[in-house]
Amino acid sequence: MSSAFDSIRGGFYRAERALRGLFGHAGALALAFALLAPACFTVPVTGRSQLNLFDATEDVAIGQQAYVSVLKESEGQLVRTGREVELVRKVVERIAAVSDDPGFEWESNVIRDPETVNAWCMPGGKIAVYTGILPICQDETGLAVVLGHEIAHAIARHGTSRMSQAVLAQIGLEAAAASNEDVAQYQAELAAAVELLVLMPFGRDDELEADHIGLIYMARAGYDPREAVAFWQRMAAAGGGAPPEFLSTHPSSEHRIAAIEALLPQAMADYEAAKKARTRK
Ligand SMILES: [Zn+2]
């Protein structure tokens, strides 16, 4: 579990230069926006208005850069062929097709690591699933719960929204900086912070939003959304030592399951509509 986390960290260190480059661009963008108006992005499905200084093509560039590094770290553990990787790619394809995809470049890989109960999706649609989560998924529908949630993080652009908040905080610091050396130092600090932001588990609100959007997407793709409740019950039973993203103690399993249950009537309507559309074909 820690080995996977460390390998992700290592990958991001290698991506640091690229992130710094992007950050420079982001800083320029942010300044431009600060002079005009805050850049707002409306999150699909929930309709929440979100601060985001990047555009969707930048999400793709940021995610791509980091993905290459992380996959290189796990090269020996990549599952190249077989049922697991075929199933993951099939589910990603089905869910991405019914999602509010702004034109992301979807790619998914399976990493052989039975100890790691985890999966993630970088900005722009680059996905990894560790084999340790597959027994908890149990089947294709369980996998759709995980991948719906991950695809939702990307579509809701949680990663670059967090980066935007950091960039705007930086503008405040820059305004307060007395000299160019101060600015350079703050930029270096922020570049490190951005790296951490990408690595850190999402906050509670982002997790609940990803659950919500993921539930609707799995239903639209024709997967029974009631299975999301069963999945999170199994995840809770698997317990404590969960790794980043799927380990997050916030929100609690109980809260998470209650929130999903409250959304089930809407998700079931989408599921029934998807089933009807499929039988008509
Ligand atoms: Zn999540």
Image (cartoon, rainbow, N blue to C red):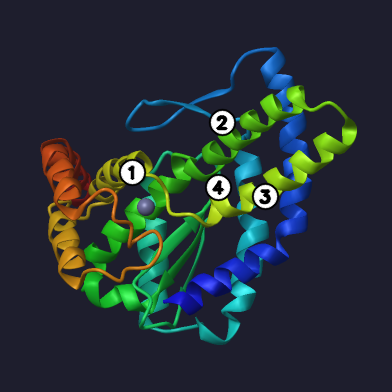
Residue extending furthest toward the front: 178
Residue extending furthest toward the top: 36
Mark nearer the viewer, 4 or 2: 2
Residue 129 in percent (x, y) is at: 42, 69
Q: Given the image, on which type of amino acid does mark 3 rest?
A: Ala
Could you tell which of marks 2 and 3 lies nearer the N-terminus? 2
Could you tell which of marks 2 and 1 lies nearer the N-terminus? 2
Q: Nearer the viewer, residue 106 or 9?
A: 9
Mark nearer the viewer, 2 or 1: 1
The N terminus lies in quadrant: bottom left
Q: CA distance from mark 2 to mark 3?
A: 15 Å
Residue 104's tag is 4
Could you tell which of marks 4 and 2 lies nearer the N-terminus? 2
Secondary structure under the numbered disc 4 in the rendered image = loop
Report which residue position mark 2 lands on: 52
The reply to whether residue 105 is visible in this rendering is: no
Q: Residues within 10 Å of mark 1 (few under 14, many from 20)?
A: some
Q: Given the image, on which type of amino acid does mark 2 rest?
A: Asn
Q: CA distance from mark 2 to mark 1?
A: 18 Å
Report which residue position mark 3 lands on: 61
Q: CA distance from mark 3 to mark 4?
A: 10 Å
Residue 138's tag is none
Report which residue position mark 1 lands on: 204
